[in-house]
Image: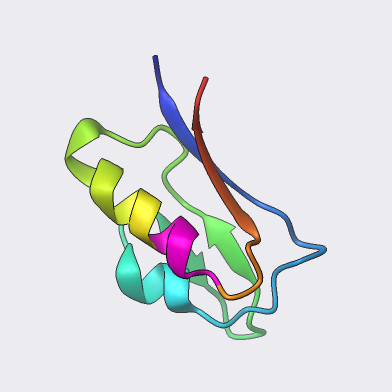
Amino acid sequence: MTLTAVIDWDKCEGNGICARVAGEIFTVDAEGNSDVILHEIPDALRTKAMLAMRQCPTKAITVSEA
């Protein structure tokens, strides 16, 4: 199973918490748009991905196994 992250841009406010918590997985551009930069998350980053999902204030991040 592969762990993946998805951002719901309708909910995302570009707070950047995801990029601060898991900069290997998420980024925020100059306009404040968050994005997933690592689509297949390795086991070594699983904890960071889950932490970013839990700390997102708008609950815009979903991390799941596909």
Horizontal relation, residue 49 to residue 14: left or right: left
Residue found at the far left of this picture: 44
Residue 5 coordinates in the image, percent (x, y)? 51, 43
Vertical order, 33 against 10 (above or below): below
Q: Residue at x 32, y 62 (%)?
A: 22
Residue 54 forms part of the magenta stretch: yes
Q: Nearer the viewer, residue 9 or 53?
A: 53
The furthest residue to the top: 1
39 in magenta? no
Residue 35 position in % (x across, y down): 57, 60
Residue 25 in picture, x, y percent from top left? 38, 53
Q: Quadrant of residue 8?
A: bottom right
Q: Residue at x 45, y 69 (%)?
A: 55
Reply above or below: 39 against 58.
above
- The vertical placement of 48 against 31, above or below, is above
Residue located 75% across and 61% down the image: 9
For the record, the magenta segment spans 52-56
Magenta segment's dominant SS is helix
Report the number of numbered marks. Answer: 0
Residue 2, percent across and down? 40, 21
- Judge from the rendering whether residue 56 lies leftward or rightward of residue 31; answer left or right: left
Instruction: Give the side of residue 30 with respect to residue 25, left or right.
Output: right
Outermost residue to the right: 10
Classify the position of the N terminus by image quarter.
Answer: top left
Q: Is residue 6 above or below residue 7?
A: above
